[in-house]
Amino acid sequence: MRIVVLAGGIGGARFLRGVKAAVPDAEITVIGNTGDDIHLFGLKVCPDLDTVMYTLGGGIDEDKGWGRTGETFRVKEELAAYGVGPEWFGLGDRDFATHIVRTQMLGAGYPLSAVTEALCDRWRPGVRLIPMTDDRVETHVAIEEDGEQRAVHFQEYWVRLRASVPAHAVVPVGADQAKPAPGVLEAIADADVVLFPPSNPVVSIGTILAVPGIREAIADAGVPVVGLSPIVGDAPVRGMADKVLAAVGVEATAAAVAQHYGSGLLDGWLVDTVDAGSVAGVEAAGIRCRAVPLMMTDADATAAMAREALALAEEVRA
Amino acid sequence: MRIVVLAGGIGGARFLRGVKAAVPDAEITVIGNTGDDIHLFGLKVCPDLDTVMYTLGGGIDEDKGWGRTGETFRVKEELAAYGVGPEWFGLGDRDFATHIVRTQMLGAGYPLSAVTEALCDRWRPGVRLIPMTDDRVETHVAIEEDGEQRAVHFQEYWVRLRASVPAHAVVPVGADQAKPAPGVLEAIADADVVLFPPSNPVVSIGTILAVPGIREAIADAGVPVVGLSPIVGDAPVRGMADKVLAAVGVEATAAAVAQHYGSGLLDGWLVDTVDAGSVAGVEAAGIRCRAVPLMMTDADATAAMAREALALAEEVRA
């Protein structure tokens, strides 16, 4: 079975472990969000790609969900001693090596997709990880801070400000000019099923879908497209998805997110059992819906979620 | 008193501590060798500038004489895990931060001299440290390895091969097109004395003198130019200066090095007491010469060497 998964960071990476456990023989292609990418200290940092790579490759800090296990912060301390920031972004020494290798390869002319493949030669994540695009896309957030309107990089909004100020707009800068990375459209066309993990529908999945050609390829693939709600009981399972949903005028409910994706794209939708009351409404909007446990509390629960998603896909197909 | 010192790495940096101790009120300008500079992992590494900066700024690993005190090597280990080398060059985590800041500033368009000044804002070395040039100069060494002739970067010859194979030629690639960095010629013109520390006469001092205009400015400054022999008893005090002296056809003796610099450039020369027998020969070549202890065993001995050099300069002046 060939499965395509669109992935953001922590939620997507953990869900992917469930997919691998549920169908060990599947050929899994992960289309990774790069809208979170940021240049720090002259280095290219790809938080979502790295979270997927480290999580599936056994290098992740399990407690934090991002960054490397057993991490130290000597380089960052020294940069601060030079007065060079930002200090609010936690880059560890081990993590720095990844960004140094990536930046060196990009500087030598390799596209991000080739660089990601080279990094995965070490991590062997057991999936094919492709960035959504080799072009530069940066998600910016229009905010009001201290009475002033300004646009900040998504990482600044998310990490420095912890989404504590209202977001008026979320813009994937450069997305309209971006082309899907080599292999992205082919993987979608060849897929037996496409899954949307319980990732942020705006800044993770939404950014991937904003690259011209990807949404269309998924809609036209003629295979089941099934998503899992990142909202459980009217609140995000993790992160601050509600803040960016508000910016795009979408209610932070499982049903509203399904309708935001839309029946033209989404065939099936899983909501948590606490949101069973929303199933009928989602189905009325033309999206097959089931209520199942959606908390990724451990490996078994996560694999069960993946199995439910694939079962719903088969239902849709039949 | 305004003192200009041409400096390589460890020997130059330690001698500079002696100069600072000997004349605390002096305005010292250090013209640093950049021929040892190398791009590693996409980062610009300036070993000699950093050794001077760390040594005078209190950040040096005193045992090794290079690199940072209390250093760790997490980044390097991770780079090796990615299969990215070279492994033979010892870059520590703290040191990496310096190269990251430098590379970022160079990428933003600042010349190396401005970057060095910015780095020194943190280290406050108590001297004005200027790279010999803002242009790229790389010392290459023509060697024979495994029966094949090839040219390697000086660092590869020095660090990886430990000067264990014969050097046929030493070429400061790019030097002929390089311009002295801003402030270099002005410092020389304004100097009361110019000192050559007991540094490598070929790949440290020699490379600085290979930048068009610097040798001429020193010769024309009309002030005493005094050097200290890096060769004591027919062997280098540290390092492998004899190997590169052979490549340029100079005997590894205190007297031969003085004559290599030449009386057109050098007014005074200090040899170690064990080489007292060579004093007459050096003086016959037109260079005033004294035999004094030249082992930088501790701070006092080093300061005494600096005082002897300055005393010889006054003798020349008179």
Image (cartoon, coloured by chain):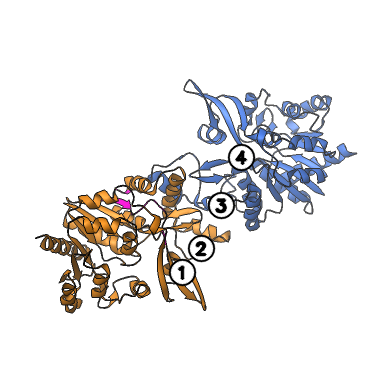
Chain colours: A orange, B blue
- In the image, the segment drawn in magenta is A123-138
Q: Amino acid at mark 4?
A: Arg
Percent from the top left, x then y, of residue A130?
A: 31, 51
Q: Please give the residue where the numbered disc 1 appears in the rendered image.
A: A160
Which numbered disc covers residue B136?
4
SS for dot 3: helix
Horizontal relation, residue A246 to residue B307: left or right: left
- Residue B224 lies, with reference to residue B100, above or below; the image says above
Q: Answer whether residue A128 is magenta in the image.
A: yes
Which chain hosts label 1?
A
- Pick the front one: B286 or B173: B173
SS for dot 1: helix
Q: Amino acid at mark 1?
A: Arg
- Outermost residue on the left side: it is A318
Q: Main secondary structure of the magenta part?
A: loop
Q: Please give the residue where the numbered disc 3 appears in the rendered image.
A: B98
User: Could you give the CA–CA distance between mark 1 and mark 3, rounded to whole angstroms?
Assistant: 24 Å
- Pick the front one: B150 or B11: B150
Q: Please give the residue where the numbered disc 2 appears in the rendered image.
A: A86
Q: Which residue is pictured at 78% across the width and 37% down the height?
A: B218
Looking at the image, do the residues carrying marks 1 and 2 touch, with CB atoms under 8 Å apart? yes
User: Could you give the CA–CA distance between mark 4 and mark 2, rounded to whole angstroms?
Assistant: 30 Å
SS for dot 2: loop
Horizontal relation, residue A296 to residue A316: left or right: right
SS for dot 4: loop
